[in-house]
Image (spheres, rainbow, N blue to C red):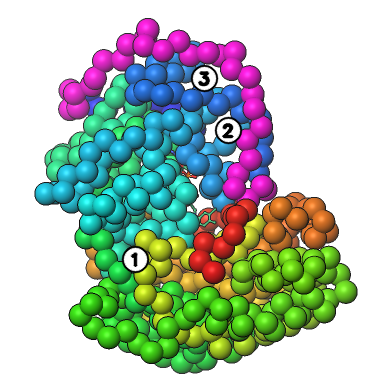
Amino acid sequence: MFHILPRILPGLIPLSLISPLAFQCDSSVDPEPVTNWSGTHSTNLRVHYPTTTAEVEGLVAEANKNRKKLRPMGSHLSPNGLSFADPNESVISLSLLDNILKIDISKSTVTCQSGCRVSSVVDALRPHGLTLPQLASIAEQQIGGFISVAAHGTGHKIPTVDDFVDSFTVVTPALGTLTFSRSDVGMNKRMFDLILVGLGLFGVITEVTISCITAHNLLEHTFTLTREAAVQRLPQLLATHKYVRYMWIPYTDTVVVVTNDPFDASASTLPTKMQTVPDVRDKLRPFTEMLLAHPGNGLSEEEVAGLGMGEVRDALLALGPLDVAHVKRVNAVEAEFWKHATGYQYKPSDQLLQFDCGGSQWVQENCFKVTDGEDMRFMTKLLVEIEARNIPAPSPIEQRWSAGSRSRMSPAAGAAGDVFSWVGIIMYEGVARERSELYPYSPCIHSRLVIPLFTPVFAGICRRTTARRGQTSRLGSRARTGRCLRS
Ligand SMILES: Cc1cc2nc3c(=O)[nH]c(=O)nc-3n(C[C@H](O)[C@H](O)[C@H](O)COP(=O)(O)OP(=O)(O)OC[C@H]3O[C@@H](n4cnc5c(N)ncnc54)[C@H](O)[C@@H]3O)c2cc1C
């Protein structure tokens, strides 16, 4: 919810005029039910859908005049329902402000309205041989939400996505429409660095210019290591690969490693062990057999055959999410699956940087600055605590890395040479579509499960291993309702 920006800027920043007649804010807009991606947060909101920047300015000016709260809302994917307001309050959806305004090939930049989805921007860039420099595991965010939360992927030399923004325009309640650029100096530069990752606090971002990179293919390598080898080999893996991601499987000695590197198959020979979809399906058999053999399974053989890896896991976990022995068995089968599903994939970067992150889920994600092997100490202690307390922790615990971002509000705020680690503990809720049939626990039970069980574990480890600045925890849920992004 944005508040009135302190009046420290006039004189330093040219303000554009707001026309109070440009848009009559309809305070009689009826509340409509809005649910986040996961289906775990829903409320009734008065959603305004402006179609022009002038309408955004009118809405913001009117809300400011009447001292009403107005929150910017993107695709409302946010794990914790971040873009929601109190029941029956107003939000401003940017979904109809979704035009790509300019692709400047000479400067390798794209300028778009903030309601553009990340996937649409990537699609629009493709014919020009350009792409976004970083992606999260899903690409359905709006550009406004994507940068306002400092979304991250992995790559210890790649900052959070906000760091690639060259300029942006924000409609503020007290100061009207402001445009900030990375080349600004003095107070404007400080405002640029502050407002960019603003969670909607400072106003509505309407337009963004982002630096792009040349579109390229990646060679992805998936393999497994023991925990000890994962700890020992991390420095070498980070030094030799552009993107590295670990997926730790609790109660097993298996860590799934996924690396990605730019590769040109026209100039170099592809490895022989390329993954194929039928091959992966075959490797899934122990998983599907376990599901079909379970007395609680209500899915037919045909239905199970159509499920991707994340969906089979969801369905299995939903049959006993708090049954530690069951979760351990599912994790063990998953570890075996990955040991046999190792190999390479070669695809455009935008396809490989997204990955199947399972179904409806609660995630507790921590970001902390890495010095002296702290990322591996953190994980080792986390797993020891989870296993000592016999917590029904499913696979995977995701670990990714990023460089520091110049944005002051990014969880990874820091210098370009800093390395941050992002650790996401995930609790699956089962396939959202069938949750009511498959899953006997409500989201509240999940939230009770996650918060009391994991938070002390996480918090304790954080205090002991990372008692320093730059550490942020995000607790929330995320889910996908469709098929796997990559299966
Ligand atoms: C399945 C899944 C996988 C995910 N994977 C990743 C991942 O790998 N890495 C990662 O970093 N994140 C990940 N996320 C989280 C996701 O990137 C964030 O939740 C992001 O905010 C979603 O964008 P949105 O458009 O839905 O924003 P919303 O959820 O609608 O809003 C998020 C915040 O941004 C503000 N906001 C939105 N638009 C504007 C605007 N125009 N101006 C000002 N403020 C605005 C809102 O007020 C709110 O505070 C994942 C989420 C899901 C569901």
Q: Residues within 10 Å of mark 2 (few under 14, many from 20)?
A: many
Q: Nearer the viewer, residue 104 or 276?
A: 276
The image's mark for residue 368 is: none
The answer to if 136 sits in the magenta stretch is no
Q: Secondary structure at mark 2?
A: loop
User: What residue is shown at x 69% (from left), y 84% (from top)?
Assistant: 286
Magenta stretch in the rendered image = 11-40
Residue 199 quadrant: top left
The image's mark for residue 68 is: 3
Q: Determine if residue 383 is in view.
A: no
- From the image, tell me which residue sits under label 2: 85
Q: Residue furthest right?
A: 295
Q: Where residue 234 sits in the image (x, y, percent)? A: 39, 84
Q: Amino acid at mark 2?
A: Ala
Asked if the residue under mark 2 is in contact with the one under mark 3, i.e. CB atoms within 8 Å, the reply is no
Q: Determine if residue 229 is in view.
A: yes
User: What residue is shown at x 83% (from left), y 69% (from top)?
Assistant: 297
- From the image, tell me which residue sits under label 1: 348
Please report whichever mark, 1 or 2, sits nearer to the chain's N-terminal start: 2
Cα distance between the residues tagged 1 and 2: 38 Å
Q: Amino acid at mark 1?
A: Pro
The answer to if 38 sits in the magenta stretch is yes
Q: Amino acid at mark 3?
A: Lys
